[in-house]
Amino acid sequence: MKTKVLILSLVTSTLMNVTSGLAKNFKNAKQMQSSKDKKVEFYPVKYTKTKNKNKDCMDYNGACLMQLSKKPVVVLENFMYQAFVNNKAGIKLYLDDRTSKDLQKATKKYLNTNLALVMDGKVVNVPSVKEIIKTNAFDISFKNPKGMETILDGLSND
């Protein structure tokens, strides 16, 4: 009985964190979508303990991210994407050959580093590079539903 209550509590807690906007965008994004005129930039970063915001600091949920490169190491444009749910919710991105090669170089150079994903000048996610990405398709998973909602809102062509 305690197990059932715990599971119900976890499911309810998860559902309360999902907004109607995320649910709508996720439902639409389960089908393959085109980014059209949208752009996602990847910057290598490291978290710092700096409390004051300065021009070299990228803000992400109140944390200061120090850029390790002034320019993005990869820029995604005109790509395809699809939302998914496995163990975590996320987005699968499909790249052209040139961008895939750029991403492979960047993930090799910045292995075990964080990459800030920036859309419209705002950091939407900061995944850790755990392996070199050698394919034209890769997954980005989200610990926080808000991050996924932000990126799906940004990619939505509505």
Image (tube, rainbow, N blue to C red):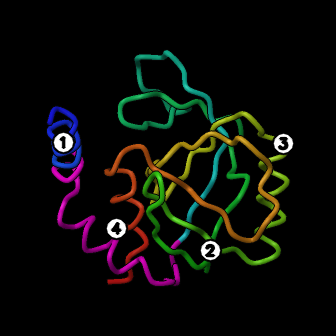
Other-residue count near label 2 (Cα within 10 Å), few / some / many at <14 / 14–19 / ≥20: some
Q: Are marks 4 and 3 in contact (CB under 8 Å)?
A: no
User: Which segment did they paint magenta?
Assistant: 13-38
Q: Which residue is mark 4?
A: 153
Mark 2–mark 4 Cα distance, whole angstroms, equals 16 Å
User: Residue placed at 68% from the left, 52% from the top?
Assistant: 72
User: From the image, which quarter does the N terminus lie in?
Assistant: top left
- What SS does tag 1 mark? helix
User: Which one is in front in this view, the residue at disc 2 or the one at disc 3?
Assistant: 3
36 left or right of 71 in image: left
Earlier sequence position, callout 1 versus callout 4:
1
Earlier sequence position, callout 2 versus callout 1:
1
Q: Is residue 20 above or below residue 94?
A: above
Earlier sequence position, callout 2 versus callout 3:
2
Mark 2–mark 3 Cα distance, whole angstroms, equals 21 Å
User: Which one is in front in this view, the residue at disc 2 or the one at disc 1?
Assistant: 1
User: Which one is in front in this view, the residue at disc 2 or the one at disc 4?
Assistant: 4
- What SS does tag 2 mark? strand
Q: Which residue is mark 3?
A: 109
Find residue 5 and report its image quarter. top left
Give percent across and percent down for residue 123: 46, 48
Q: Is residue 46 magenta?
A: no
Give percent across and percent down for residue 153: 34, 67
User: Residue placed at 63% from the left, 35% from the top?
Assistant: 45
Mark 4–mark 3 Cα distance, whole angstroms, equals 30 Å
Earlier sequence position, callout 4 versus callout 3:
3
Q: Are marks 2 and 3 in contact (CB under 8 Å)?
A: no
Type of residue at label 3?
A: Lys
Q: Are marks 2 and 1 in contact (CB under 8 Å)?
A: no
Q: Is residue 25 magenta?
A: yes
